[in-house]
Each structure stands twice: as C-alpha cells, then as structure tokens.
C-alpha cells in the first residue's frame, strides 16, 4: 500500500530519528517549480529505515540499499510517487572512480558537505520545517548560480559526473556557472572518460531538454567536456560556412537547437535531431568553383555519422532511427504547389513530417535569408494532403507478396520488394488508385517482363 508523508514523518518522530527533506524537491520548491523528486535523509541506518516503512505497510524497494537508500511509495492527495530515504552519507571517493565507497555519517551537516552544488545542499527538517543552509544555496538560487560545495576540483575529482550534472542544471534552470566552479570543470573534464556511457548519456539527454540548451551546450564545449563525451561534434566549432550562414557549423547547430519549435512529447526527438542535423558538414566540406565553401550531400554523411553516434550513446533504437532519418531528409525541398512532390516529402518521413518541418524552420532561422513564406506554404500543403488524401499518403501496394507469388507462380525473392515498391510509389504519386488490384496486376506484369 501507499502511505502519506505525514505517516512517514510520524514514524520517524516516534522512533526518535531525524528526517530531513533534501535535494531537488526542496530546491525546486524554493524556485516555485513543481517537483515529484521527494527525497529524505536520516540518521537511521538502512535496516532501520526499511523496518520503519515496512511497519507502516508501505511498498518498499531495496535496490539502492547498499548505497544507503530505501525507496518507498508515498501518496500526496491523489498522486503516488516513489521517494528515496537515504542514510546520512560520509562518502569517500578515489579520484575518477565511477561510484563512491559509501560510508554512513551521523549528522545532516556532514551529509550536506558531501553534496555537489550549493543549490542541492539545502535541507528542511521534516518535523519543524526549519531550513538548513550551510553553503549559501538560497543566495545562489536567488543569483541563479551553479556553485560547487567547497573546493570545486575536489568535488569533481570525487565524481566526474558532477561536471555534467552542473552543466545540466545550468541548462535546466537557465542558471550561470560560478567562475571558480567552471574552472574546476575545465581542469577535471578529462576524468569524464572514466564514466559509463549510460551515466553520460542520461545527463546529456537532460541537458538537451533543458530551459536553456544553448547555454548548456556552449558551456559543455567551453570547459572541454564536449571533446570527451561528444568528440564527434568537436570539429563543428571553427568549421566556417558560406555566405548564407551567420555562424560556423557549431554556432549554427546551437542556434538550431535553441530555435526548434517544441511540441508535446517531441522535445527529446527534436532537440537531438537539431543537434545532429549538420553532423556531416565538417566531413564533406570542400571549396566550390566560385571559391565558397560547399557541403554537398552532407545530409547523407550526417545520417550515417548520427546513426553510429546514437548507437554509441545507447539513446534507444526507436528515437535513434527517427533522428537519423530526419537528418538524412532535412535538405529535402519539395514544391508546395506540386502535390506529388509534397506527398513524397511526407512519405519519406512517415509519422515525422511535422518534426522534419520544424527542423527545416529552425535550420533556416540563422541563415542570412528569410525562407518563412516557403515553409508556411509547405506546411499548408502537408496539412491539406494529410486531411484530404490520407489513403494515398499511406502508399500501400494493392498487391501483397502472397498475391504476387500466387499470381505469377514464382518462388519468393527480392523481385517481390521491387514490384511492391513500384506499386506503392504509383499510389503515392497518384498514378494508381489505392486498392485498384486490376490496374496493379497489369503494372506488375509489365514490370516483371522487364526484370
């Protein structure tokens, strides 16, 4: 069953144990941001914490118990969410290691002193609601600053992931990074190579979906972390472009990420696509006959590079395939007045044409010319076709593979795909009505006569 926060605090009070609200929930509340990330710290050891919450009949998870954390399902009104209760920490690290050697502390002061940034080193007594701020976290929240607790280099040597966490917080909150903290990030950035890919990708993913991804990306590059965690993008900086662009490839990429229009459930896909859309430019850059830089077929090279990068990042198969496909198609320029051209544009990005159009708009935003009228016309044409020609847009061959095998009494083979692709293209182009099996058979017989 789920229990309430009041029941939880009552159990710890009765046991004469401390219980402090810590971490993101307290920080976000002070910023006026809603948060589900409710975490507590206590002087009770993990076994006692588990016994206390099980005694309340709560749902419990002990996955993090060896690190001192017990998970409990709590109810707040009609909302239910997992919270973590962690024994005061006194961690000791070896420089550059992935995980701390956990030692348990005895005071909240010791626990807060081992945290990463001042804005995360706040605590509120769950009984008296007194706030404990030992490192100026509230002042840094007001100043919108990311500042390390104590000596920055030592904090980042203890756990290099804190570098990416700091950059991610800067992006998520739109904060600046305090100069000494940023200098510490730059000094210890090479230690990021000791981290697992999963931990790195999780932070990059959250950075890219933040309030200020452009600021986060610029900080990632400036402190040297880009060279370590996304070396495939490093040569974008300083890669000059032609007169149609205001920025080099890196500057243009950051502007595209910042500009791309977001849509419900599409932020992750669109931000990653914007980040990688010109990945192929440095690899194919050449001097044209007129002396300007050219980037012929950079979208094709970029799609291949993006696919390899996304596989390394382990971002997830579905999103990775979609992102690589959108990168490959971002230079498509159909004529809005030509329905056939527009249908092909939409069919090449099935289910993603709006994302592709959003990318094209953002890609154009930092050009030296205005292409908004074209994109408005293209969007209107796509909307009309989706509304009026949905059957044709699906572009399905009227004949299945089984139909073709039975019709021509041939063994299955690559010829089936050739015929079906041709029939599908004819449906898409308007040369064959959806479901017209008679006309499809005539076309198939002509085509097979040439195969």
Image (cartoon, rainbow, N blue to C red):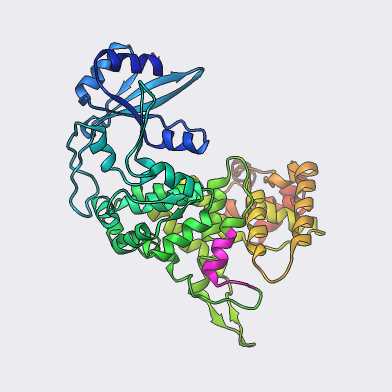
**Residues rendered magenta in the picture:** 245-256
Q: Is residue 249 magenta?
A: yes
Q: Residue 204 at what x, y percent from top left?
A: 43, 52
Q: Residue at x 27, y 50 (%)?
A: 159
Q: Out of 119 and 339, give the one closest to the viewer.
A: 119
| Residue 445 visible, this orientation | no
Q: Is residue 131 magenta?
A: no
Q: Residue at x 54, y 81 (%)?
A: 286
Q: Out of 415 and 254, give the one closest to the viewer.
A: 254
From the viewer's perspective, is 263 left or right of 441? left
Q: Residue at x 24, y 49 (%)?
A: 98
From the viewer's perspective, is 153 left or right of 294? left
Compared to residue 409, the image places residue 369 above or below, namely below
Q: Out of 346 and 419, give the one closest to the viewer.
A: 346
Instruction: Give the position of the C terminus as an image quadrant.
Output: bottom right
| Residue 134 visible, this orientation | yes
Q: Residue 259 at what x, y percent from top left?
A: 62, 56
Q: Residue 321 at what x, y percent from top left?
A: 51, 51
Please, which residue is most extreme toward the right here? Answer: 337
From the viewer's perspective, is 353 left or right of 11? right
Compared to residue 29, the image places residue 61 above or below, namely above
């Amino acid at each position: 069953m789920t229990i309430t926060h009041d029941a939880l605090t009552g159990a710890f009070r009765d046991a004469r144990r401390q219980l402090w609200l810590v971490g993101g929930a307290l920080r976000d509340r002070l910023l006026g941001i809603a948060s589900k990330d409710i975490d507590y710290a206590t002087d009770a050891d993990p076994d006692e914490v588990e016994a206390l919450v099980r005694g309340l009949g709560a749902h419990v998870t002990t996955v993090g118990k060896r690190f001192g954390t017990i998970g409990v399902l709590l109810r707040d009104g009609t909302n239910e969410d997992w919270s973590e209760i962690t024994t005061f920490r006194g961690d000791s690290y070896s420089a550059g290691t992935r995980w701390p050697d956990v030692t348990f502390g005895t005071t909240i002061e010791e626990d807060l002193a081992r945290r990463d940034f001042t804005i995360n080193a706040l605590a509120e007594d769950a009984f008296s609601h007194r706030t404990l701020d030992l490192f100026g976290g509230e002042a840094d929240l007001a100043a919108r600053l990311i500042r390390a607790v104590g000596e920055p280099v030592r904090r980042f040597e203890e756990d290099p992931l804190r570098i990416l966490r700091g950059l991610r917080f800067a992006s998520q909150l739109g904060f600046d990074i305090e100069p000494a903290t940023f200098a510490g990030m730059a000094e210890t950035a090479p230690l990021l190579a000791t981290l697992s890919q999963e931990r790195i990708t999780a932070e990059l993913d959250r950075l890219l979906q933040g309030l200020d991804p452009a600021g986060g990306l610029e900080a990632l590059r400036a402190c040297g972390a880009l060279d370590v965690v996304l070396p495939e993008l490093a040569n974008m900086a300083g890669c000059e472009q032609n007169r149609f662009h205001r920025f080099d490839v890196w500057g243009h990429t950051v502007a595209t990420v910042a500009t791309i229009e977001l849509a419900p459930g599409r932020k992750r896909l669109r931000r990653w696509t914007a980040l990688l859309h010109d990945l192929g430019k440095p690899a194919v850059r050449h001097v044209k006959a007129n002396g300007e830089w050219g980037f012929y077929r950079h979208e094709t090279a970029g799609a291949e590079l993006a696919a390899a990068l996304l596989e390394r990042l382990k971002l997830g198969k579905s999103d990775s395939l979609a992102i690589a496909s959108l990168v490959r198609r971002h230079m498509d320029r159909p004529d809005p007045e030509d329905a056939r051209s527009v249908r092909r544009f939409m069919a090449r990005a099935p289910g993603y044409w709006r994302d592709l159009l959003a990318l094209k708009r953002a890609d154009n935003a930092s050009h030296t010319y205005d292409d908004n009228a074209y994109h408005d016309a293209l969007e209107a044409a796509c909307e009309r076709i989706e509304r009026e020609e949905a059957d044709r847009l699906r572009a399905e061959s009227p004949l299945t593979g089984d139909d073709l095998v039975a019709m021509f009494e041939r063994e299955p083979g690559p010829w089936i795909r050739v015929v079906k692709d041709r029939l599908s293209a004819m449906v898409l182009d308007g040369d064959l009505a959806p479901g017209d099996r008679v006309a499809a058979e005539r076309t198939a017989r002509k085509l097979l006569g040439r195969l």
